[in-house]
Amino acid sequence: MAKINNTIQIDIHGMTVDEALKLLREQVKNAPRWIEKIVVVHGYNRGTALKEAIPKLRNPRIKEIAPSFLNDGETVIWLCC
């Protein structure tokens, strides 16, 4: 996990869907209020299970979950205050 400015980047390569969702739920829940987005690196060459699971996350802080326009192997979770 890396923090850059208002962004957290989390790499979930190699995780199961359950492991990845648990980690992402914890990160969304515990993210400081100044964090605006979480970039999730899931890859795309070996299947789409992780990519397809991310939009199922639910939390009042999640404003939007969208694919990255820069990288097919990333999804962006936009957070509100």
Image (cartoon, rainbow, N blue to C red):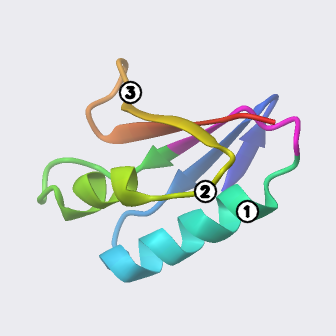
Mark 1 touching mark 2, by CB under 8 A?
yes
Q: Nearer the viewer, mark 3 or mark 1?
A: 1
Sequence-wise, the earlier of marks 1 and 2 is 1
How many angstroms separate mark 3 from mark 1 (CA)? 22 Å
| Disc 1 residue type (three-letter) | Lys
Q: In this view, does 28 lie to the left or right of 25?
A: right
* Secondary structure of the residue carrying numbered label 3: loop
Q: Where is residue 20 in the image (x, y as percent from the top left)?
A: 44, 71
| Disc 3 residue type (three-letter) | Ser
Q: Looking at this view, is 56 or 8 the one in front?
A: 56
Q: Name the residue under label 1.
A: 29
Q: Mark 2 points at which residue?
A: 59
Q: Residue at x 19, y 47 (%)?
A: 44
| Disc 2 residue type (three-letter) | Asn
Q: Nearer the viewer, mark 1 or mark 2?
A: 2
Residue stretch rendered in magenta on the structure: 33-39
Q: Where is residue 27 in the image (x, y as percent from the top left)?
A: 68, 62
Sequence-wise, the earlier of marks 2 and 3 is 2
